[in-house]
Image (tube, helix red, strand yellow):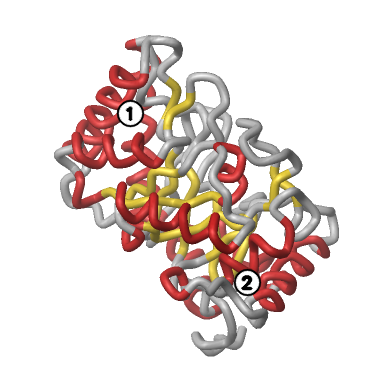
């Protein structure tokens, strides 16, 4: 496998299935034309995962390096909810997060995306504090880890936290493990939460709000997803690039934003069995990167 030059166009990639092993995810990423890759390191809908096999972890790292895929990103299991009002769920979530961190370390993955969680009706302040404490607990149990946890922006469904940039700022401010935390920006989610990323003025206002709350430099990964629903709907429904309510205008803003030039943009959009939709989505992002961007 030939390593592609690191400067070959925008830093775009996709979330790929690890069915058959993580090394197979690399094969799928190469076939789609990815420069960066996101995976699940375990089943995304189960608490426990299969034991880490060192030889398989080394094979994954070797394949990714040979393919020139970097940075590597893992998305944590959906069951994790550090803000849960149920103490049993919170404890299981903290243990599961530790396991996710250890899997990232074993597989040479520097970034772990985490949904902040849902307060379950007990209020934002209680939920935000629980998230911060849960992050600190996981950090205390993995003192030598080099994995950075990326708090992902949320769409705002139900009692979920993270749809307001102020939520993310509060978690960062309250967590003693702050040096090990950063952010993942999801375009569909912030659109659904009510932020305008389509108009030029809206894009600038949204970035100004994020910068004043948390700092743009904390955005280490971007999930590039169009939205099936209108802005402010609070519904998380991903669509293929340019076919949703964000449309090409919004992704021109993203792909031409100087502050995010070196930040990986990863598709989590609908897939077809042949992988054509991923190839088309990545091609669309590359094309839009050449358009005239926001003033």
Q: Which residue is mark 2?
A: 34
Q: Which residue is mark 1?
A: 95
Instruction: Name the residue at 76% across, 69% down.
Output: 279
Residue 226 numbered tag? none
Give x and y (percent) for residue 259: 41, 70
Q: Is residue 91 placed above or below 116 in the rendered structure? A: above
The tally of labels here is 2
Front-most of residues 33 and 107: 33
| Quadrant in the picture for residue 97 | top left
| Quadrant in the picture for residue 290 | bottom right
Give x and y (percent) for residue 1: 61, 83
Q: Earlier in the sequence, mark 2 or mark 1?
A: 2
Give x and y (percent) for residue 295: 53, 74
Left or right of 245 on screen, residue 110: left
Q: Residue furthest front?
A: 201
Residue 185 can be seen in this image: yes
Closer to us: mark 2 or mark 1? 2
Instruction: Name the residue at 27% across, 29% down.
Output: 134
């Amino acid at each position: 496998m030939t390593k592609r030059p690191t400067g070959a166009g925008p830093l775009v990639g996709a979330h790929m299935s690890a069915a058959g092993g993580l090394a197979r995810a690399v094969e799928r990423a190469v076939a789609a034309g990815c420069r960066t890759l996101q995976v699940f390191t375990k089943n995304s809908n189960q608490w426990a995962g299969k034991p880490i096999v060192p030889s398989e972890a080394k094979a994954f790292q070797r394949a990714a390096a040979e393919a020139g895929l970097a940075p590597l990103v893992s998305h944590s299991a959906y069951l994790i909810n550090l803000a849960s009002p149920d103490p049993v769920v919170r404890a299981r979530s903290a243990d599961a997060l530790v396991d996710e961190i250890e899997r990232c370390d074993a597989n040479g993955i520097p970034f772990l995306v985490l949904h902040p969680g849902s307060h379950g009706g007990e209020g934002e302040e209680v939920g935000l504090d629980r998230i911060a404490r849960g992050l600190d607990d996981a950090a205390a149990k993995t003192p030598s880890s080099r994995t950075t946890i990326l708090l992902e922006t949320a769409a705002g469904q139900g009692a979920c936290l993270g749809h307001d940039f102020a939520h993310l700022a509060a978690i960062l401010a309250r967590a003693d493990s702050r040096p090990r935390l950063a952010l993942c920006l999801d375009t569909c989610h912030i659109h659904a939460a009510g932020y305008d990323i389509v108009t030029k003025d809206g894009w600038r206002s949204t970035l100004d709000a994020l910068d004043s709350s948390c700092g743009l430099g904390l955005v280490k990964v971007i999930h590039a997803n169009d939205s099936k629903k209108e802005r402010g709907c609070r519904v998380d429904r991903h669509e293929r690039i340019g076919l949703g309510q964000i449309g090409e205008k919004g992704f021109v803003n993203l792909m031409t934003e100087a502050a995010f030039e070196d930040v990986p943009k990863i598709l989590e959009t609908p897939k077809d069995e042949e992988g054509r939709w991923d190839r088309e989505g990545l091609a669309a992002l590359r094309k839009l990167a050449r358009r005239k961007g926001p003033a």
